[in-house]
Amino acid sequence: MNLRILKVLLAKEVRLMRRNPFIPRLIVALPFMAMLILPLVANFDVRNVGVTVVDNDCTELSRRIAANMDAAGFLSVKECVFTYDEALQTVENGESDAILVIPPGYSADLLKGRNPQLSLDANGVDAIKGMLGSRYAAISATQTVSRWLSEQGLPLAVPHVNILNYYNPTLDFRNYMIPALMVVLIIIICGFLPTLNLVSEKETGTIEAMNVTPVGKFTFVLSKLIPYWVVGILVVTLGMLIGWLVYGLVPAGNVGCIYLAAVLFSLVMSGLGVTIANKSSTILQSIFVMFAFIMIFQLMGGLFTPIPSMPHWAQYMTYAVPPRFFIEIMRAVYLKGAGISDLWPQYLALSGFALFLCLVAALTYKKRA
Amino acid sequence: MERYIYEKAIDVQSVSKQYGKIQALEDVSFSVAEGSMFGLIGPDGAGKSTLYRILTTIVAPDGGRATVAGLDIVKDYRKIRAEIGYMPDRFSLYPDLTVNENLHFFASLFGVSVKDNYDLIAPFFDQLVKFPNRRAGALSGGMKQKLALGCALIHRPKILLLDEPTTGVDAVSRSEFWDMLAVLKDKGMTILVSTSYMDEAKRCDRIALINGGRILDMDTPERLVAGMGDNLYNASARDMYPLLLALRDMHEVQDCYTFGATLHVVAGADFNPEEISVRLNRMGFDDVEIYPAKGDIEDLFIKLAGNG
């Protein structure tokens, strides 16, 4: 490798990058898009669950249950009706998502020390909304009933449970997404861009002229990767700044751990990108192959679906998906304040992938056919 | 011995190359004397570009040996790259870099300065100097060729390898380009140039006619044309196509093909132009004219390619 030639090539890359009408804007716009819009959109928080109350009791308690439910943050009572069929109609119309049935004589039974049942039916088409919505409604009803019972001086029929969520006390989905979104940024900047750059040299034929100069193959590929590594690190920094300034989320652990993982993951992505570029002869080809990988990385890496809730066979497959380890590191460092000593298996896996993919990239790059 | 090898700036000995089932080059041998201009003449797909890729060490041959500037193309491929200037068959500069940036980029890759070597490219580069900040992609075809030649020459190579440099360039620029090559040759540069335009062949010192991966014939253009014999005639009439068919039917005619505005007739034994004219007159070609023609490289090529 020749440092003088590398410097000449890098100067050219930077000049071309700055002159490109698209790349510099992408580098700035992408983190802003990803960090400002996606955490608000891509979240599984369930809000505005509509509930229809079938009130066959018609007492102060049944009215209080409905009123408290309407006042709860994520719930709103759409209608109070007297028959189940009317209530079902509102679910079928899509006006509400759940039905709460208060049986006749409910508060009287409670006062007599019996154990009457409320029933709660939810629309399961949107599984997450159905599940969480009915849970919220149940919590609200239980709270109202137990408060009412204590006001009447009766023993609590329902044991009271205190829930405390560790690491993400408010169960805010954003705190879960923001660290992982930075992974997506590196996937795109360090995976996609060098691939497109290398293949475009093939398409314009400039690689032919380059191949007959004394430029070594390693130097040439390195000149393509270094700028994007720098950009990748800048984008992560920008992402962390936005996370802090806009969402007030700062890593609980050491920022150095995040940068180390980001550097390792940049190596993984650029190794994969160069391998794909070596095997494609047109930009279109490389885009399609890269896209297939990115799809799998996003869906299998634990970005949206938590890995423990995947089927067992799929969980084993995720060990072959490099972003899985980076996402784990990011979330652990950000939310739990973990360090390298806790996360060494993940760091080791990322290093292994980086070494392997860079080796494959070097072996598939042929200057001489 | 060393000196003897070096007198052959390029020496190719029975080089072969196969791509899958396609035999791109078959037993090709030739050599180029130092300071001369050698032309590879042949149609598209003849194997010219493959030969260039082998000589520029991008591709290794399947069989045979070759040296460039006395260096083996397989063993010394790194050293060769500093000795040659190569212009691929398609434009291969960075279209988003300016004229000046491209030139300085290629100079600094070789670790030389543009100023030191500018004298070599000055004769043809003066036109480009007028717009140093124009992007290479925005230049006209002829200008692009000049810039590409400048970038290939800026490290003062000993041997210049040009693969179809004039393809897709207008006739005036083509002629200018060959004038530039003549100037470079006068300065002692060895040039290997390929073209599919037969009329450019006579500007080379020696040419090789290449087709289907094989060299058909090789000599100076004059001697190749002279060796063709005097059995070539022009034929013309109002209805050219029926005339072509009629002549091809005659047993005294070896071959007949269109050549510009007339037909070229390759005469066989006992071909008598007067007698043929009379016969054609009787067949209805009342305005037929047949007269001796001076053959050129294209006629020779058709003859050789037809025999192969």
Image (spheres, rainbow, N blue to C red):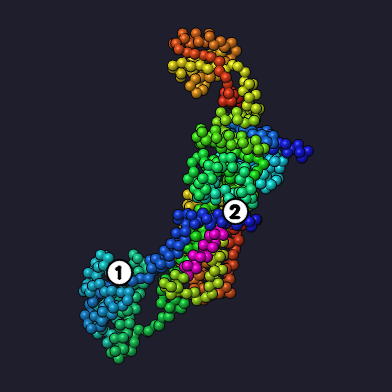
**Disc 2 crowd, CA 10 A, few/some/many (<14, 14-19, 20+):** some
Magenta highlight: main SS = helix
Q: Is residue A260 magenta?
A: no
Q: Are marks 2 and 1 on the same chain?
A: yes
Q: Secondary structure at mark 2?
A: helix
Magenta region, residue range: A218-240
- Residue B98 in sight from this viewpoint: yes
The chain under label 2 reads A
> Which numbered circle lies on residue B48?
none
In-front residue for pair B67/B183: B183
The chain under label 1 reads A
- Residue B24 in sight from this viewpoint: no
Say which amino acid is labelled 1: Asp
In-front residue for pair B256/A206: A206
In-front residue for pair A20/A40: A20
| Residue at image point 21% right, 74% down | A82
> Which numbered circle lies on residue A97?
1
| Residue at image point 56% right, 59% down | A226
Estimate the spatial distance between the alpha carbons at disc 2 and disc 1, rounded to whole Å. Answer: 59 Å
Residue A111 in the image: x percent, y percent?
A: 27, 87
Q: How many marks?
A: 2
Quadrant of the image occupied by residue A73: bottom left
Residue B279 relative to residue A82: left or right:
right
Which of the two labelled residues, at mark 2 and mark 1, occupies the earlier sequence position? 1
- Which quadrant does the N terminus of chain B fall into? top right
Residue B223 in the image: x percent, y percent?
A: 65, 24
